[in-house]
């Protein structure tokens, strides 16, 4: 091997060693000093595993940092215990999460005034000592964001330190920017609970693109073929003033758009519920909830949700095409939604597009079959036997069942009247009859004769005696042969004793 070949091999070996050194030592240092690029559109920004008083009071807060509206249909919140082998669904989401919007998902009966979704505790509570929770998009394999705490090991980087009892894990935020280094221990700190539910739809930009171009280029010449007046063919006179084609119509339209105030529409009103349909209708298909539009204009329902159940575990989100005409009605049936109205007791509420619980929370006790629960004009809810879907409510109360009149008073009155008639002088008999008639009519027993139906004890004794006589007679007849035989035996016995005494 020549000297040049040895030198060439030494250079190649040096290059290989340099590459290995760079990958093993320099790359980790650069990675540790740089901040990973944010890839998540929605982040978990707060988590509570227990409150000061109840280990079942849990919630999670998620926030949209993408700057665009995200459809949450099919998204799920999943939990995995620290020693668990699989993920389980805690809540299924729906609706839209707008830019910078936040939603709160909590355990049942907790934070009902701000929570948009609720999860059941059947799959276990969030362990305060440690666990894992993640946000999974619809039909996705990889999670949008994951948080591990305490003894949990399935989060991003190292798990965050578990929060003290009564406090929550909150994502760090600096000047409105959420920190996401993909390392839970660095991104989360413990603090007092501050759940925020604010999901406001951004206003739509109503300025046409052509108008925006004209605004950006105010001196742009106008095409004569589009702006020429076919009636006035007189060329413009040069008076020394600006003869440029005026833009007054366009400017006027823009001014009008700016001056027209946005109409703040009132939320729809929960107006009537059919909870227990009468046969042959069924609960699964024919239960319904009616909404009313109190506004003078059409009301779009995009972003609104209806929730039912004692813990509001059933939810339905309206789609873009759902609207209510001015002062009109809309009825949604159980056959078209996953809403369920419990026949024993339950509640119905409306969630606004910004994730806030509406002013109405309709609660009811045991339902009445075939009757609807309707809002009366005085603002109270009443059961009515006249359901009126898609129409003004008609309150028809159930007729009260009056108890049957007792006749005890009539009997005592009759007896007292009878006694009075016996002891009263003959000329006063007419007055007694008149009094008796008035008393009888007041108890609805006029001219009905009264009899003493108390049983006679003597008749009872006679009946028993007759029964005994018949029984003895039947026994004598049935056993007459035996009786005659016994009599003969006795007579023989007596004759034999008589003969024996005579022989002595």
Image (cartoon, rainbow, N blue to C red):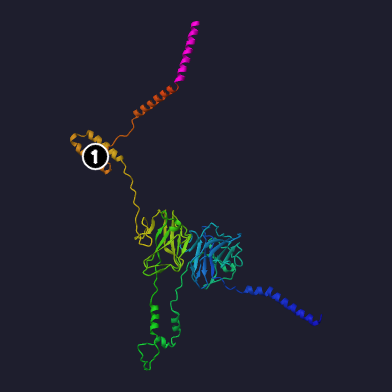
The secondary structure that dominates the magenta segment is helix
Front residue of this view, candidates 159 and 18: 18
- Residue 374 in percent (x, y) is at 38, 58
Measured from the top left, where is residue 191 in percent x and y? 53, 65
Badge count: 1
Q: Quadrant of residue 139?
A: bottom right
At horizontal 67% and vertical 75% (from top left) the residue drawn is 26
Name the spot of residue 488 as percent of width and height, x first. Answer: 46, 15
Residue beneath the point at 27% across and 39% down: 448
In reply to whether residue 493 is colored magenta, the answer given is yes
Look at the image and tell me in which quarter the N terminus lies. Answer: bottom right
Q: Is residue 215 magenta?
A: no
Given residues 466 and 205, the one toward you in this image is 466
Based on the displayed image, in which of its 4 quarters is residue 434 positioned?
Answer: top left
Q: Which residues are magenta?
A: 480-504
Q: Viewed as shown, does residue 335 lie left or right of 23?
A: left
Vertical comparison of 457 with 381: above or below: above
Residue at 78% from the left image edge and 81% from the top image edge: 7
Q: Relative to 260, is 452 above or below? A: above
List the residue tagged with mark 1.
436
Pinpoint residue 409: horizontal percent, then vertical percent: 29, 40
Q: Determine which quarter of the picture holds residue 303.
A: bottom left
Q: Secondary structure at mark 1?
A: helix
View extreme (right): residue: 1
Going 49% across and 62% down the picture, which residue do you hit? Answer: 117
The foreground one among 434 and 297 is: 297
Label 1 packing within 10 angstroms: few (<14), some (14-19), many (20+): some
């Amino acid at each position: 091997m020549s000297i040049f070949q040895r030198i060439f091999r030494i250079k190649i070996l040096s290059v290989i060693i340099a590459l290995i050194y760079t990958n093993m030592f320099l790359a980790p240092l650069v990675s540790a000093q740089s901040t990973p690029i944010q890839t998540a559109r929605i982040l978990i920004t707060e988590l509570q595993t227990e409150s000061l008083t109840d280990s079942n009071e849990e919630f999670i807060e998620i926030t949209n940092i993408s700057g665009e509206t995200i459809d949450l249909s099919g998204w799920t919140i999943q939990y995995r215990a620290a020693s668990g082998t699989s993920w389980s669904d805690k809540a299924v989401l729906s609706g839209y999460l707008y830019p910078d919007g936040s939603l709160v998902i909590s355990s049942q009966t907790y934070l009902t005034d701000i929570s948009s979704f609720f999860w059941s505790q059947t799959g276990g509570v969030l362990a305060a000592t440690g666990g894992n929770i993640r946000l999974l998009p619809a039909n996705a394999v990889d999670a949008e964001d994951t948080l591990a705490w305490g003894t949990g090991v399935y989060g991003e980087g190292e798990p965050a330190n578990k929060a003290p009892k009564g406090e929550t894990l909150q994502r760090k935020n600096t000047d409105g920017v959420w920190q996401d280094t993909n390392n839970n221990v660095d991104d989360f700190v413990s603090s007092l609970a501050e759940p925020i539910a604010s999901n406001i739809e951004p206003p739509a930009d109503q300025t046409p693109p052509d108008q925006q171009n004209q605004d950006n280029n105010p001196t742009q010449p106008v095409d004569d073929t589009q702006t020429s007046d076919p009636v006035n063919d007189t060329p413009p006179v040069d008076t020394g003033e600006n003869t440029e084609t005026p833009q007054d119509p366009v400017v006027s339209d823009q001014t009008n758009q700016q001056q027209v105030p946005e109409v703040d529409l009132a939320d729809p009103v929960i107006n009537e519920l059919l909870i227990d349909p009468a046969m042959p209708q069924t609960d699964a298909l024919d239960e319904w909830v009616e909404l009313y539009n109190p506004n003078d204009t059409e009301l779009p329902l995009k972003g609104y949700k209806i929730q039912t159940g004692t813990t509001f575990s059933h939810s339905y989100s309206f789609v873009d095409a759902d609207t209510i005409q001015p002062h009109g009605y809309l009825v949604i049936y159980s056959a078209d939604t996953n809403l369920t109205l419990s026949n024993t007791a339950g509640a119905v509420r409306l969630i606004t597009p910004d994730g806030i619980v509406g002013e109405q929370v309709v609660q009811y006790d045991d339902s009445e079959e075939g009757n609807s629960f309707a809002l009366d004009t005085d603002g109270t809810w009443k059961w009515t036997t006249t359901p009126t879907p898609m129409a003004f409510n008609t309150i028809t109360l159930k007729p009260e069942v009056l108890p049957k009149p007792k006749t005890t008073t009539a009997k005592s009155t009759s007896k007292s009247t009878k006694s009075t008639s016996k002891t009263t002088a003959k000329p006063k008999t007419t007055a007694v009859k008149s009094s008796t008639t008035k008393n009888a009519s007041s108890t609805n027993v006029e001219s009905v004769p009264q009899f003493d139906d108390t049983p006679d004890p003597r008749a009872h004794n006679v009946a028993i005696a007759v029964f005994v006589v018949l029984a003895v007679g039947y026994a004598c007849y049935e056993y007459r042969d035996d009786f005659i035989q016994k009599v003969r035996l006795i007579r023989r016995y007596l004759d034999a004793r008589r003969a024996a005494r005579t022989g002595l």
